[in-house]
Image (cartoon, helix red, strand yellow):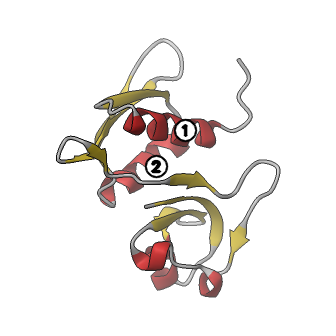
Amino acid sequence: MCMTDPVADMLTRIRNAGMAKHQKVDIPSSNLKVSLATVLRAEGFIKNFKVIADNKQGILRVYLKFIDEKEPVINEIKRISKPGGRVYVNSDKIKQVKNGLGVAILSTSKGLVTDKTAREMGIGGEVLCTVW
């Protein structure tokens, strides 16, 4: 199966699993997806994740986080930069997500970072997604 946007697929799987109240979701693994999961865990949007080796590319198992075991912590997870329309920003043009309640995840020369970290470091990059 040919997938044109693996990051959007990951975000959709996480969104759907949260709405269905699943405790975990399995996603085909890649270095970018592992980095994205690392940022989501650091920001408190997911409990944890682990990479499971298989004979192919590996599986990224993401453990979702819920409020009172009912409502997912992630209210909205949205892809911003898409294969058909990339979105790049300078450090001074990075906007806050939901007045600072959410985060934007950027792909920079220093790896994947949040909008706040990118502003502090004074670097811009490609806005992959927003989460709140």
How many numbered callouts? 2
The answer to the question of whether label 1 and label 2 lie on touching residues, with beta carbons closer than 8 A, is no
| Residue for point 65% across, 58% down | 80
Which residue extends farthest right?
A: 84
Amino acid found under the numbered disc labelled 1: Thr
- Residue 26, above or below 4: above
Q: Which residue is mark 2?
A: 35
| Residue for point 51% across, 82% down | 119
- Residue 81, above or below 4: below
Looking at the image, tell me whether mark 1 or mark 2 is earlier in sequence order.
1
Q: Residues within 10 Å of mark 1 (few under 14, many from 20)?
A: some
Q: Which residue is mark 1?
A: 12
**Which part of the image, by quadrant, shows the N terminus?**
top right
Of 16 and 128, nearer the camera is 16
What percent of the width, then of the height, locates residue 53?
40, 20
| Residue for point 38% across, 38% down | 18
What percent of the width, then of the height, locates residue 84?
82, 50
**Which part of the image, by quadrant, shows the C terminus?**
bottom left
| Residue for point 41% across, 37% down | 19
In the image: residue 38, left or right of residue 109: left
What percent of the width, then of the height, locates residue 86?
76, 59
Quarter of image, res 92: bottom right
Marks 1 and 2, Cα distance to the nearest angstrom? 17 Å
Amino acid found under the numbered disc labelled 2: Ser
Of 123 and 7, nearer the camera is 7
- Mark 1 falls on what kind of element? helix
Which residue extends farthest front?
A: 70
